[in-house]
Image (cartoon, grey):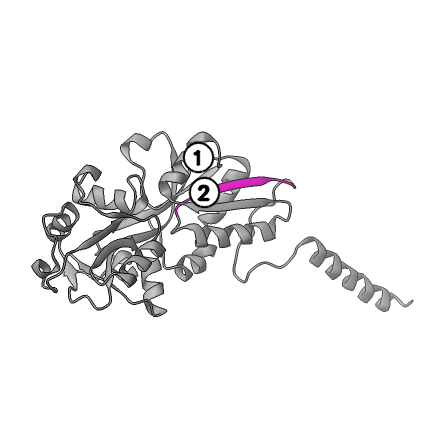
Amino acid sequence: MTPRCFQRLSIAALVVLTLAFFPCSHAGESTPNQVAPSAKLRISGSASLLPLLTEIARRFEEFNPGVKIDVRGGGTAAGLADLRSGASDIGMMARSLSDTEKDLFAFPIARDGIAVVVNAKNRVTALSNKTLTDVLTGKIDNWKSLGGLDAPVVLALGPEGGGSWETLAQHLKLRYTQVAPHQLITTTEDAIAFVSQKPNGLATGSIGVLERKAREGAPIKLLDYDGFPAASRTVENHLYALARPVVLVTRRAPEGLNKQFIDYALSPALIDLQLKYGFVPYKD
């Protein structure tokens, strides 16, 4: 074999070895540091965050073949309960920490908003701080008072401790005991099903999910709030009042696999996934 042929063979072999040890990543995406094989991570909480975190977890697993990540929904309140009991390593919350939760460590990964959603045929188009408060507390119980048909307002709300309710409660200065009788729902998909089937229904849910489902043809309408549309663009521009961070939460300062996953979830390389699921990239 000539020296030139040997040189070509050596270069080819080097390329093969390089590809074997450094697999390709998503275009423009940073690769998380690889972790020890056979590691496991348990994440649970907000149903609104479930699709986003599931896809982030799958990408992380691609870079770390020995890692297995279990991502489950159930709601913000359930995720916090799992975290405190040790049933999960990381919680997903669709709201900021409350004063009684300051012992936990929160890491905002994106922003979202809470929208009031009704049936697409409902004549009402907007609510104010006062009218929303009056509807939730039962002082307004007929759509006619809001410019709609003469028909009762039928409420559906999330549980106390959940992301949607706690965001509303903080903004409107309400307690759960003040809320009018309502049907209990746990996810934005529940809210969509509720108002789709009930012409007089009113519910709340994630703006990102609701916008996406409305574009797909769901018979729903998002009401303006305090003069601004319930939309990702008004959340991004800090115009929409019912905005909230969506966060990952741990019991203690993260280290090891927990830290590596959270660092990856906070990476700008994942903005494409945030936008895909209707979230607004988080900025301090």
Vertical arrangement, residue 99 with respect to residue 205, above or below: above
Which mark identifies residue 44? 2
Q: Is 226 part of what is drawn in magenta?
A: no
Which quadrant holds the N terminus? bottom right
SS type, badge 1: helix
Q: What residue type is labelled 1?
A: Leu
Say what amino acid the circle numbered 2 marks: Ser
Q: Residue at x 70, y 53 (%)?
A: 21
Displayed quadrant of residue 102: top left
Q: Does the magenta stretch include residue 40?
A: yes
The residue at 9%/61% (across/down) is 144
Give the left or right position of residue 249, taking residue 236 as reference.
right
Which quarter of the picture shows residue 68? top right
Residue 52 locus on image (x, y percent)? 44, 54
Q: Name the residue under label 1.
A: 83
How far apart are the two marked residues, 1 and 2, measured between alpha carbons? 8 Å
Quadrant position of residue 176: top left
The vertical placement of 121 against 86, above or below, is below
Mark 1–mark 2 CB contact (< 8 Å) = yes
Magenta residues?
A: 38-46
* Residue 227 visible: no
- In this rendered view, identify the residue nearer to me: 245 or 210: 210
Q: Residue 26 appears at what percent x and percent y?
A: 55, 60
Most common SS among magenta residues: strand
Instruction: Name which residue lies at 48% across and 42% down.
Output: 43
Count of all numbered marks drawn on residues in the image: 2
